[in-house]
Amino acid sequence: ATHLQRFTQRAWRRPVKTEELTRYLAAYESEREAGESVAEAFRVALKGVLTSRHFIYLVEGEPEVREQLNDWELASRLSYFLWSSMPDEGLFQTAQDGALTDVLEREVDRMLTDDRVNRFIEDFSRQWLQLHKLGMFAPDKGLYPRYDSWLETSLRDEPIEFFRELFTNNLPIKQFLDADWTMANARVADFYGLPEPKSDGFQRVSLRPEDHRGGLLTMASVLGLTSDGTRHRPVHRGVWVSETIFNKTPPPPPANVDSIEPVPPEGDKVTIRERLAVHAQNTSCAACHRNIDPYGFAFDQYDAIGQWRTRERVEGGKGQDPLVDASGVMPDGREFRDANHFKQLLFEDRDRFLRAFIEHVSTYALRRVLTVDDADDIDAIVEEARQNQYGVREIVRAVGLSDLMRKR
């Protein structure tokens, strides 16, 4: 019983009372009476512990009703937030002593400087930026011969390494929207036309205006994951900006909406944007397209794999491929000329972006959807972030130390 209790406390990440082990000890005795060895019978008991919901889930707050997490529950919430794993001995001991709330700043700072925080950097950035979608539609080899598996892997890693650089150096959140540098390896540098890095792996590389890059929105991975393998999709790019930058998920399209019409063989070549304009005249579509499409049109000078272009390749039709138009009007009426001007307008909305980013981090930390009841706690984190100059690591730290993290 002592060995099983010790194991269960580790598996369930909290103290375990002897009576909670009754069913598992009974399974052990039953196996022994059936003639199984001590080791095999004990294995059955361990299997029961590991298939319990107390192991599979982070159970918080039962059987008593209370508003705050206890130290054991808070230790697990923090650990799975920042380390993607169970608490270490230091957190366990602090929870055992009932002192975690009192030394929370010390423990969060320790966790943020531990190498295991790289798990947060990688897991959160993949989820936040939807990087799992990259490669979902394999680019057509005939249209995009430069695209290969090494390029895809490298492009997927670029925003993760970019996030790591911002987090490690506590750089301001505005650099997610625009920056005069990126993180590149040899394959990314070749694809972007940048000087080849001097060493293997990713390193910080300066960008010039003529490189047409800067920040997350013009990274080829983001532009590629919102494409379908043959062409760019402005609407999907707009949805990505709405969800990622502003944390607003647009409503789904109405049922049985027709897709945009292809260019007929005898018709003039026209851009996807021009075909969308016809599609969006449908009254059931117009309102949503007005709020989504401009976010995507800003990046029309990038093709399906994120290459810069001035003309859009149009399959079918006759005449010269048309020039790209990347101008537009924001839902609030502000006009922009191209992607760079659009990013300037986003920077003017940086407090909206700050709040959205904090909501994304908080959702990841809590592993639940935020509600209106969380608004005051989010406001407090936003104000803390402003006082700390919008630093990325300080934002994550503020979430870890927030009242929101301590509530059930």
Image: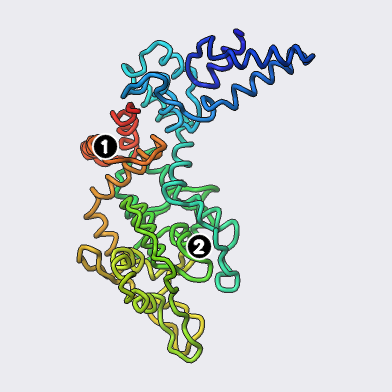
Q: Secondary structure at mark 2?
A: helix
From the image, tell me which residue sits under label 2.
191
Q: Which image quarter holds the C terminus? A: top left
Residue furthest to the right in view is 35
The answer to whether residue 38 is left or right of residue 395 is: right
The answer to whether residue 145 is left or right of residue 57 is: right
Residue furthest to the top in view is 2
Q: Position of residue 145 (x, y in %)?
A: 58, 69
Say whether disc 1 or disc 2 marks the residue closer to the N-terminus: 2
Which amino acid is tagged 1? Asp
* Identity of the residue drawn at 50% across and 26% down: 86
Which amino acid is tagged 2? Phe
Q: Quarter of the image holding residue 327?
A: bottom left
* Identity of the residue drawn at 77% across and 16% down: 36
Is 373 above or below relative to 188? Answer: above
How far, Cα to Cα, is label 1 from label 2?
Answer: 46 Å
Is 99 above or below relative to 109? Answer: above
Q: Position of residue 79 (x, y in %)?
A: 44, 28
Is 178 above or below relative to 374? Answer: below
* Identity of the residue drawn at 39% across and 57% down: 240
Residue situated in front as seen by the camera: 27 or 42: 27
From the image, tell me which residue sits under label 1.
373
Q: Position of residue 7 (x, y in %)?
A: 58, 16
